[in-house]
């Protein structure tokens, strides 16, 4: 539907621009052409009448004047305008309208009369205040035996011509609008034929993105290009399905196969711890046993992740609980390092979309960094803002130089004041773990100490997973 609407709107806009671009100039051309033709016709009429008039017809004789008046009225009926005959001084001696007899027409407002008195026929269309509109006027000299004996002036209203131009323009617009409507119908039909297979393909893509690896576009209606697109999409979907299933099988099989040797290692370590009389050896064996437990947890996590992906479930974690666990894990080291590790939970519902093990690893990185680089108070804070939950670790150590702040989350970057033995991977790993779940990491260097904020998207239903 959106594709069809956009295509129809685009076509309508383009066609409307074309209609306006063509109709407006065409209307102007029609108007100018009609005025030019009216000027030429009016001048031709004036010259025709002037050609049939003679000196004798213009004499100051009552009989001749009456005949001239009758002829003037007849001429006016023939040309459809007002006909005025002037003498050589420009004074009206016959007027078909019988309004301005004896009036001097040789005024600045009537340049056509001045031109005719100079033996130059003239015509124009101009505004008339008397007529309250545009008029076409023309004046032609009356020549008898090579001598100027008078002038014929014709004037006519152009309203009729303008009305004809308006009707012609309206007809053109009507035809254009009809073409617009027909074009819209055609475009909607074409857009519908194009949009139907594309909409189906989009639906299939959403299903594949939501985890339905069996989604396929199949055979789509449309041209060769649409069929080729559907075929390429289905081929891609098949490859994705094979790849994902192979990855899931590898994770599940590898995790399962590692359980047995780890169980044997743990039993041997426990037996060695119980049988050894050397306290130093037992300490090392207990440390190794903890690492085995940690490795077992990683394997369990991989199995859980594989199961979640297979079932299409989304993991959930409680950020408040994660902070409590992290502070408890690192409290002993904090005491040994003369640090004061404390936590603060702001808000009751801090469920986020993330794997709990990833959240724990992020907290371990942040707290480990703070304990390594800063003594004194270290606060771990969990809080919520609209759409996200944030865990912050703030210390009062020496801080990070401003020119290094933008680079500390890069892999293997170690600043000038970094402690020996580090790899430069901690913050990079924390950032990548947060981004894996749609979150992020922000680091702020303060006047005293450093604060790192890691945020995760809030779980929509507020529930947390295992």
Image (cartoon, rainbow, N blue to C red):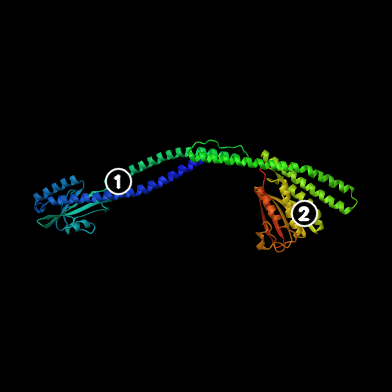
Q: Which of the numbered marks, if any, corresponds to residue 63? A: none
Compare residues 32 and 304 and report the one nearer the observer. Answer: 304
Picture quarter containing residue 248?
Answer: top right
Q: Which of the numbered marks, if any, corresponds to residue 165? A: 1
Tell me the CA gap for discs 2 and 1.
88 Å
Is residue 18 left or right of 253 when viewed as pictured? left
Are the residues flagged by discs 2 and 1 in contact, CB closer than 8 Å? no
Q: Check disc 1 and report its element: helix, strand or loop.
A: helix
The residue lying at 70 percent from left, 50 percent from top is 383
The residue lying at 78 percent from left, 55 percent from top is 341
Q: Quadrant of the C terminus?
A: top right
Compare residues 11 and 129 and report the one nearer the observer. Answer: 11
Image height of 37 relative to 422, above or below: above
Residue 275: image location, x then y, percent: 89, 48
Compare residues 359 and 394 and report the one nearer the observer. Answer: 359
Q: Which badge, 2 or 1, is on the more N-terminal residue? A: 1
To which residue does mark 2 refer?
Answer: 342
Q: Check disc 2 and report its element: helix, strand or loop.
A: strand
The residue lying at 38 percent from left, 46 percent from top is 19
Residue 198: image location, x then y, percent: 52, 40
């Amino acid at each position: 539907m959106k594709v069809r609407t956009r295509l129809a709107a685009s076509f309508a806009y383009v066609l409307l621009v074309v209609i306006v671009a063509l109709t407006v100039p065409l209307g102007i051309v029609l108007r100018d052409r009609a005025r030019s033709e009216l000027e030429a016709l009016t001048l031709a009429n004036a010259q025709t009448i002037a050609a049939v008039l003679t000196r004798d017809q213009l004499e100051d004789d009552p009989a001749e004047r009456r005949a001239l008046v009758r002829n003037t009225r007849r001429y006016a009926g023939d040309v459809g305008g007002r006909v005025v005959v002037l003498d050589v001084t420009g004074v009206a001696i016959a007027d078909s309208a019988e309004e301005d007899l004896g009036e001097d027409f040789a005024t600045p407002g009537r340049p056509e009369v001045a031109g005719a008195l100079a033996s130059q026929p003239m015509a124009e269309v101009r505004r008339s205040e008397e007529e309250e509109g545009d008029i076409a006027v023309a004046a032609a000299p009356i020549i008898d035996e090579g001598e100027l004996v008078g002038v014929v002036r014709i004037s006519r209203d152009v309203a009729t011509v303008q009305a004809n131009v308006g009707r012609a323009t309206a007809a053109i617009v009507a035809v254009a609008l009809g073409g617009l409507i027909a074009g819209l119908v055609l475009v909607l039909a074409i857009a519908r034929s194009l949009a139907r297979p594309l909409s189906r393909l989009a639906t299939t893509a959403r299903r594949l993105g939501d985890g339905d690896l069996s989604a396929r576009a199949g055979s789509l209606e449309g041209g060769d290009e649409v069929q080729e697109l559907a075929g390429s999409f289905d081929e891609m979907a098949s490859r994705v399905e094979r790849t994902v299933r192979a990855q899931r099988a590898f994770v599940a099989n590898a995790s399962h196969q590692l359980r047995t040797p780890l169980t044997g290692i743990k039993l041997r370590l426990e037996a060695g711890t119980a049988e050894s009389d050397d306290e130093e050896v037992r300490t090392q064996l207990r440390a190794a046993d903890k690492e085995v437990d940690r490795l077992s947890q990683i394997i369990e996590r991989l199995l859980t992740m594989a199961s979640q992906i297979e079932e299409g479930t989304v993991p959930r974690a409680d950020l408040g609980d994660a902070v409590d666990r992290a502070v408890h894990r690192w409290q002993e080291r904090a005491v040994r390092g003369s640090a004061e590790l404390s936590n603060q939970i702001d808000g009751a519902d801090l469920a986020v979309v993330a794997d709990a093990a990833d959240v724990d690893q992020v907290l371990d990185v942040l707290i480990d960094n703070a304990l390594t680089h800063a003594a004194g108070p270290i606060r771990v804070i969990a809080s919520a803002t609209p759409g996200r939950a944030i865990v912050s670790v703030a210390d009062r150590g020496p801080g990070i130089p401003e020119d290094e702040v933008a680079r500390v989350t890069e892999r293997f970057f170690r600043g000038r004041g970094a402690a020996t033995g580090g790899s430069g991977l901690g913050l990079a790993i924390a950032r990548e773990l947060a981004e894996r779940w749609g979150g992020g990491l922000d680091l702020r260097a303060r006047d005293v100490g450093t604060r790192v904020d890691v945020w995760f998207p809030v779980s929509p239903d507020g529930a947390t997973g295992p």
